[in-house]
């Protein structure tokens, strides 16, 4: 039997209902903030990500699923959604002289070492806003994420970490100062950080290795390089978060693994998932639209890692139901199968949210009840058992006191909706 590709998961029927509900909650909140959906391709030219995410990032250096198209073009499965989102809005002229608030949802692909909470195909829901330079939009996006955690019941499991990278120029100056400081210590750094010294020194700041952290203690501080405008932006954001009652922690080592960020960066992190602490991450990326060939456009956004949110949801609500049907239609004799299917159809039309399953494959009523029980259904509808036309026999499967009763069809259909 051919197995699934390493790091690519199946979401099985026992879990998909939870996924559906969590996704529906987040999408409803995005809509309530008036973000509009944008659907983006899974494949893009590799160059888009190389230029967008940055050549020197782990994602581009070693995590892309790239392939040559039949005509020789290099294409890649998207490792994230932000670069594609900018590409699409720019390509359709939607960034010119207007603002945008959009969201996208779907799978992303990164060739990472798989473990719990880290997969090679994973799902994100991302939100992005364009044309707003102020901290108000940073605050709105953070509030949006906060609302998601509250409504999903995982609010006490995630907390917000915040930092500012300042303008592109501030970041460059800091990079040089950090390099000057680290170079004499190069031998003592861990191998990953040694490699990053050449390619992406800022990433050394979030190294988890104790010896590297010790060296970093006296390193120059990013905040000292942020100019007055950058500081004002950051302070205004913090003031808004305080007014919105959203707690946060300043983390000067939060630098993010993608190259496009400027000013605000943030991560919603958890202690409940071991090493995979970030459940949602984002920030401002004012330079990206221009870097990809558009006009200078301020931008800010985040992406939720749904696989991790789902793990937290499981911890918060371990006995979430995996019921597959609400009403189980039993067929008391083979002749009434057609009538049973029609009756089920009426019920589905009357109550589109009910999950109605018709027993298939015949057999004794006893066996049908067993199946009804296993489906998790609350009610059984016994087609063919009625003694009066236009009446239906229903049986409550979870409460013997209600038991079985024959009712006029309309009344019975009403009862079945009382799950
Ligand atoms: P990111 O930090 O690379 O940012 O990913 C965002 C979130 O996706 C992470 O916090 C994590 O929850 C989830 N994630 C990332 N990699 C994996 C993986 N291998 N397995 C499971 N979950 C994963 C971005 O992607 C940016 N595009 C976010 C953004 C949007 N910034 C501005 N706008």
Image: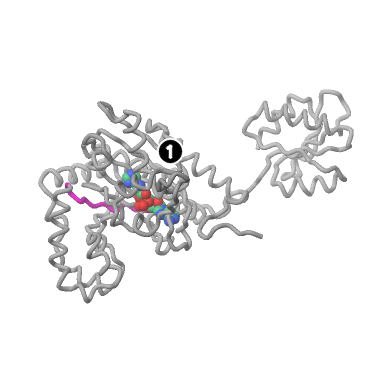
> Picture coordinates of residue 301 (x, y %)?
32, 42
**Height in image: 170 above or below 220?**
above
Q: Quadrant of the N terminus?
A: bottom right
Between 212 and 383, which is closer to the camera in this rendering?
212
**Residue drawn 23% across and 52% down?**
163
Q: Quadrant of the C terminus?
A: top right
Is residue 363 part of the magenta span, yes or no? no
Q: Is residue 13 left or right of residue 365?
A: left
Between 259 and 223, which is closer to the camera in this rendering?
259
Between 167 and 281, which is closer to the camera in this rendering?
167
Q: Is residue 325 visible?
A: yes
> Picture coordinates of residue 372 (x, y %)?
75, 45
Q: Is residue 280 visible?
A: no
SS class, disc 1: loop
Q: Which residue is mark 1?
A: 40
- Extreme residue toward the left, this view: 228
Is residue 165 part of the magenta span, yes or no? yes
Q: What colour scheme has been applied to the protein in the rendered image?
A: one colour
The region drawn magenta spans 156-167
**Height in image: 353 above or below 2?**
above
- Extreme residue toward the bottom, this view: 188
**Residue drawn 81% across and 45% down?**
368
Question: What is the total number of numbered labels drawn onto the structure image?
Answer: 1
**Residue drawn 85% across and 47% down?**
366
- Extreme residue toward the front, this view: 71
> Picture coordinates of residue 17 (x, y %)?
58, 45
**Height in image: 409 above or below 280?**
above
Q: Residues within 10 Å of mark 1 (few under 14, many from 20)?
A: some
């Amino acid at each position: 039997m051919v197995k699934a590709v390493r790091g690519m998961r199946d979401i099985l029927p026992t879990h998909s209902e939870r996924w559906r509900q969590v996704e529906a909650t987040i999408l409803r909140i995005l809509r309530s903030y008036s973000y509009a959906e944008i659907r983006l391709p899974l494949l893009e030219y590799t160059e888009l990500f190389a230029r967008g995410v940055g050549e020197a990032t782990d994602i581009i250096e070693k995590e892309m699923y790239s392939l040559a198209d039949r005509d020789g073009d290099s294409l890649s499965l998207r490792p994230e959604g932000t670069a594609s989102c900018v590409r699409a809005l720019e390509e359709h002229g939607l960034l010119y002289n207007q603002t945008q608030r959009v969201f996208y949802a779907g799978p992303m692909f990164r060739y990472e070492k798989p473990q719990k909470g880290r997969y090679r195909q994973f799902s994100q829901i991302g939100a992005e806003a364009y044309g707003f330079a102020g901290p108000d939009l940073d605050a709105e996006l953070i509030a949006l994420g906060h609302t998601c955690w509250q409504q999903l019941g995982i609010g006490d499991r995630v907390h917000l970490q915040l930092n500012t990278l300042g303008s592109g120029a501030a970041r460059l100056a800091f990079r040089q100062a950090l390099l000057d400081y680290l170079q004499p210590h190069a031998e003592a750094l861990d191998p990953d950080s040694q490699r990053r010294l050449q390619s992406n020194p800022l990433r050394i700041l979030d190294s988890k290795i104790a010896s590297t952290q010790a060296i970093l203690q006296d390193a120059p501080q990013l905040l000292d390089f942020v100019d007055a405008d950058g500081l004002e932006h950051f302070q205004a954001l913090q003031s808004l978060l305080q007014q919105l009652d959203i707690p946060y922690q300043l983390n000067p080592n939060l630098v993010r693994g993608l190259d496009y960020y400027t000013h605000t960066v943030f991560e919603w992190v958890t202690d409940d998932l071991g090493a995979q602490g970030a459940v949602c991450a984002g920030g401002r990326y004012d330079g990206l639209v221009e870097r990809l060939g558009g006009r200078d456009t301020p931008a800010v956004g985040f992406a939720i890692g749904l696989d991790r949110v789902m793990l937290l949801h499981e911890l918060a609500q371990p006995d979430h139901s995996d019921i597959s049907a609400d009403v189980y239609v039993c067929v008391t004799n083979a002749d009434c199968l057609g009538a049973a299917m029609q009756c089920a159809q009426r019920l589905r039309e009357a109550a589109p949210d009910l999950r109605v399953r018709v027993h298939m494959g015949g057999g004794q009523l006893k066996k049908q009840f067993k199946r009804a029980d296993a489906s998790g259904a609350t009610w059984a509808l016994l087609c063919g058992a009625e003694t009066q036309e236009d009446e239906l026999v229903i049986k409550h499967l979870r409460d013997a006191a209600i038991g079985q009763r024959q009712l006029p069809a309309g009344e019975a259909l009403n009862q079945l909706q009382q799950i």
